[in-house]
Amino acid sequence: MRSSMLRFGLVAAVLALAACSSSKPPQTFDLNVPARLAGGGPVRGNLVVAEPSAVATLDGQRVVVRPNATEVTYLGDAQWSDRLPKLVQSKIVEAYENSGKLKSVGRPGDRLTVDYQLVSELRAFEIDAATGVARVELSAKVVNDRTGQITAAAIFSATRPVGGAITGLTATSALDQALAEVLGDLVGWRSRAGA
């Protein structure tokens, strides 16, 4: 019994010591949306923006860094403010709202009378460590909610140099700039593609 108590006390002390020596938590970063986005004229109808699908490496809060074409790592000192697909969905909605081009825009469950859905896939949202370039790629489809027909489809991509050492701040800033270009192209495309 005494031996068990001693072992329990030793384990508790080790766990308490480990808890006290925790490392600095990663910095948390958000993405920005330009206040005004260019594009075509107003488009009729209501648009619901589905959460983008993404592979497991992009479906989290960690900032992806690719040392080469087949290897995936993450920045240890940085994270996104939410799961990346949910964060990008939020920024797509915000970009359309800021553009004023649609009658209304929202997410599934927002109780809109849906005319069209924007279905997308987040294909890249990463830093290429070999070149020091941030890359964002989004595949998008506009689906007529009444017929299920795809009325338009396109792939949007943008790159931005990281500018110096790859840190949480430089990496997320470059990714933010690349996403801003993708969002501008997406909103302009949807306006030109019409309903």
Image (cartoon, rainbow, N blue to C red):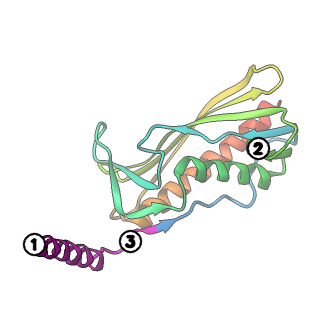
Comes first in the chain, label 3 or label 1: 1
| Left or right: 37 as drawn, with respect to 20 | right
Most foreground residue, 1 or 10: 1
Determine whether the residue tagged by mark 1 lies in a helix, strand or loop: helix
Chain-order first, disc 1 or disc 2: 1
Which of the two discs, 1 and 2, sits closer to the camera?
1
Please tell me in which quadrant of the rendered image residue 44 appears. top right
Cα distance in 3D space between marks 2 and 3: 34 Å
Q: Which residue is mark 2?
A: 109
Nearest the camera: 105 or 190? 105
Whether residue 181 is situated above or below residue 189 in the rendered picture: below
Name the residue that disc number 1 marks. Answer: 3
Magenta region includes residue 12 = yes
The nearer-to-camera label among 2 and 3 is: 2
- For label 1, count other residues whose C-alpha is less than 10 Å away and answer few (under 14), some (14-19) or many (20+): few
Which element carries disc 2, helix, strand or loop?
loop
Q: Amino acid at mark 2?
A: Gly
Of mark 2 and mark 3, the one earlier in the sequence is 3
Amino acid type shown at disc 3: Pro
Q: Quadrant of the C terminus?
A: top right
Residue at image location 79% in from the left, 52% down from the top:
97
Q: Quarter of the image holding residue 3? A: bottom left
Q: In the image, which disc is placed on residue 25?
A: 3
**x and y percent of residue 51 in the render?**
63, 42
Q: What residue is shown at x 81% (from left), y 19% (from top)? A: 147
- Tell me where the magenta segment starts and ends, as one range: 1-27
- Image location of residue 128, percent across then percent down: 36, 48
Q: Secondary structure at mark 3?
A: loop
Which three-letter amino acid code belongs to the residue tagged 1? Answer: Ser
Is residue 132 found left or right of 114 in the rendered image?
left
